[in-house]
Image: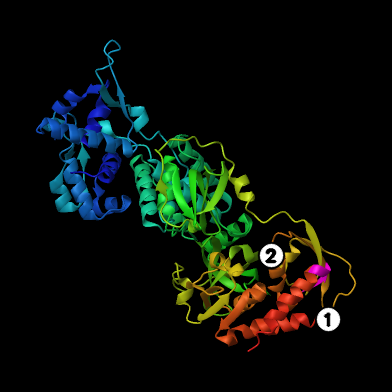
């Protein structure tokens, strides 16, 4: 019995194997995103498929002996199925969203390539589909992204004009490695040559990129920047804030480990890697903060607030 | 599979009795089993997007219903890509964090490869974009939007009935734009705030999606346009986010080591929090109301010294 998913795959597999003669079993499985054992099962199903009539000459031919011996697939007698089926709406939309996400990180020629590829795909999948999902990532200017991508390609160190999470400007020298997105923001992942450590820089906070002419050097693979990347930072500390209900917005704007409803508000657990970030968050929340645990974590913000108040005349 | 090939090869509508004779796997079935199997296979093909047409070859006897798949409706049209386009396509396979959507994108790329396109991710090692879909209601709303099926869901505790039009991904979250049936007006919904999976309350394709301007609908959610101006004292080189919305001005009462800037803001936005976040780098000179509000918040934070 064949499932709908398998039939959808088989209808693409037959033209694929005809346009890629002697395709390797493992490579082909990877193209279709299935295990090699599943692909073998697909081939065994195709073995029984073919033109109506079911006479030997009507069936699709696959040399299963060669598949078993050398892992190479040769499929013939299926000229009538030489083109794949149109995209299903789900396939078309998933691909369009993925490309739009790439677009949000790209600059220059690549961005143009994506725009034209999207236009072609939309024509190919027919105008029948609903308006495609838009994707917006906060990733600064296309010009900055292109300069960074060029420096990565050239393996060259750069100086950044950067405004950090604590709102303090800095000019780090970094070896740029890749541009990534996380939770709706674009980041540069780079080896900080000043600190000799991996760092991430929000692209919208990079004000300028200057090439240095110095080689970037090899610093190995950057750490995985997946969900929960903050937890992998050894210097991250957990802080619990008790907040008034009016501060509930922070759960949507900041990475939160846990939220609990408590009497008169909410309690959130945050992982803090950068004290300057917590300081500015507490200053922003002001009276919405009921308590901070551990209490020392509030000291930086308190000092900063006292310093600011000193600039206002008494009364 | 054989049914798909049979209908695809047909130059005219094929009647059910003929299909039963020629398609491998059908002729050994009992009458009832054939009916069941055929109907199921046909429905499955249609659900996959295979355009199975129903019609009659004989205008005089339109009751003699047959089936066919028109090749031009079935096949992916010819499509050619430039090298920078194939490079972008190669990256697309790795973007989705959600396994279900990643499979769909991989399947679409496999079809392109079957059509002779060769997406090449190797050229873009510097870019690693990703898109999540962690919202519990995402799958149900995505499917309803694709199929244009009206849904019912709880939105922050309130029941809503919606005709989904389009989805959009902003600031790391998914949003749905659709017609709110109870309010009889378009509304934008944050998918993370949908209580549980959306429940279908109508057939797929049972409403029309108007030409919507997602961009304009989104702008209506953005912070309001600036309607006020504050004079702030800024430390040199600090608070670039505020500087971007302002210009240097001359003002009285600027503390030593600061420079005066006029900065526009919207009264609807949290400008007090925005200013407080800068600590001693920003001091409000006017208006007085804003100055008092900032002092009140800062005093609360300063009082929290341990």
Residue placed furthest toward the bottom: B306
Residue B128 percent across, percent down from the top left: 47, 60
Q: Is residue B68 visible?
A: yes
Give the quadrant of residue A36: bottom left
Residue A65 percent across, percent down from the top left: 12, 47
Give the chain letter at badge 2.
B
At 63% across and 78% down in the image, what residue appears? A279
Q: Nearer the viewer, residue B192 or A25?
A: B192
Residue named by callout 2: B270
Left or right: B34 in relation to A289: left
At 40% across and 38% down in the image, what residue appears? B204
Looking at the image, how many numbered discs can be counted on the residues? Answer: 2
Q: Disc 1 and disc 2: Cα gap in Å?
A: 24 Å
Q: Examine the rendered structure and indicate whether residue B260 appears above or below residue A50.
A: below
Q: Nearer the viewer, residue A20 or A249?
A: A249
- Per the rendered image, the range of residues in magenta is B283-289
């Amino acid at each position: 019995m064949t499932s709908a998913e398998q039939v959808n795959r088989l209808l693409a597999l037959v033209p694929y194997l005809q346009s890629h003669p002697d395709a390797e079993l493992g490579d082909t499985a990877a193209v279709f995103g299935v295990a090699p054992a599943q692909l073998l099962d697909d081939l065994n199903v195709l073995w029984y498929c073919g033109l109506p009539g079911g006479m030997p000459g009507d069936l699709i031919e696959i040399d299963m002996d060669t598949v078993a011996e050398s892992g190479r697939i040769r499929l013939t007698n299926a000229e009538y199925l030489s083109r794949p089926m149109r995209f299903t709406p789900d396939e078309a939309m998933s691909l369009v969203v993925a490309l739009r996400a790439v677009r949000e990180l790209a600059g220059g020629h690549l961005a143009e390539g994506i725009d034209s590829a999207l236009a072609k795909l939309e024509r190919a999948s027919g105008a029948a589909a609903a308006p495609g999902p838009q994707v917006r990532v906060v990733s600064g200017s296309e010009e900055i992204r292109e300069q960074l991508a060029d420096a990565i390609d050239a393996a060259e160190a750069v100086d950044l004009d950067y405004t950090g999470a604590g709102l303090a400007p800095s000019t780090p020298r970094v070896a740029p490695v890749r541009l990534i997105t996380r939770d709706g923001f674009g980041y540069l992942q780079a080896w900080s040559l000043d600190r000799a450590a991996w760092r991430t820089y929000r692209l919208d906070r990079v004000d300028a990129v200057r090439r240095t002419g110095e080689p970037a050097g090899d610093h190995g693979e950057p750490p995985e920047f997946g969900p929960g990347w903050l937890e992998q930072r050894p210097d991250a500390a957990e802080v619990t804030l008790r907040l008034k209900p009016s501060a509930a917005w922070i759960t949507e704007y900041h990475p939160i480990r846990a939220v609990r409803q408590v009497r008169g508000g909410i309690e959130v657990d945050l992982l803090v890697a950068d004290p300057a970030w917590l300081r500015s968050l507490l200053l922003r929340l002001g009276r919405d903060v009921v308590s901070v645990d551990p209490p020392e974590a509030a000291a930086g913000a308190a000092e900063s607030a006292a310093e600011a108040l000193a600039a206002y005349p008494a009364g | 599979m054989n049914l798909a090939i049979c209908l695809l090869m047909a130059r005219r509508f094929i009647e059910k009795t003929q299909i039963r004779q020629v398609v491998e796997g059908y002729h050994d079935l009992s009458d009832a089993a054939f009916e069941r199997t055929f109907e199921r296979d046909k429905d499955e093909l249609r659900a996959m997007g295979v355009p199975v047409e129903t019609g009659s070859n004989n205008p005089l006897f339109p009751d003699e219903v047959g089936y066919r798949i028109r090749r031009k409706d079935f096949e992916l049209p010819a499509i050619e890509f430039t090298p920078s386009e194939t490079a972008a396509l190669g990256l697309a396979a790795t973007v989705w964090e959600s396994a279900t959507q990643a499979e769909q994108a991989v399947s679409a790329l496999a079809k392109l490869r079957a059509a002779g396109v060769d997406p090449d991710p190797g050229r873009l090692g510097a870019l690693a974009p990703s898109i999540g879909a962690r919202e519990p209601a995402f799958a149900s709303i995505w499917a309803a939007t694709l199929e244009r099926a009206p849904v019912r869901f709880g939105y922050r505790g309130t029941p809503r009935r919606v005709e989904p039009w389009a989805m959009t991904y902003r600031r790391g979250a998914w949003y749905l734009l659709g017609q709110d049936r109870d309010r009889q007006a378009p509304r934008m919904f944050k998918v993370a705030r949908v209580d549980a999976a959306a429940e279908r309350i109508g057939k797929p394709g049972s409403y029309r999606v108007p030409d919507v301007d997602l961009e304009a609908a989104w702008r209506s959610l953005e912070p309001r346009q600036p309607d006020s101006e504050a004079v702030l004292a800024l430390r040199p080189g600090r608070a670039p986010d505020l500087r971007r919305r302002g210009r240097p001005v001359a003002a009285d009462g600027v503390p030593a080591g600061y420079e005066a800037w006029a900065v526009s803001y919207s009264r609807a936005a949290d400008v007090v929090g925005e200013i407080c976040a800068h600590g001693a780098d920003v001091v409000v000179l006017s208006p007085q109301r804003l100055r008092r509000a900032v002092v009140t918040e800062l005093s609360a934070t300063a009082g929290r010294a341990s």
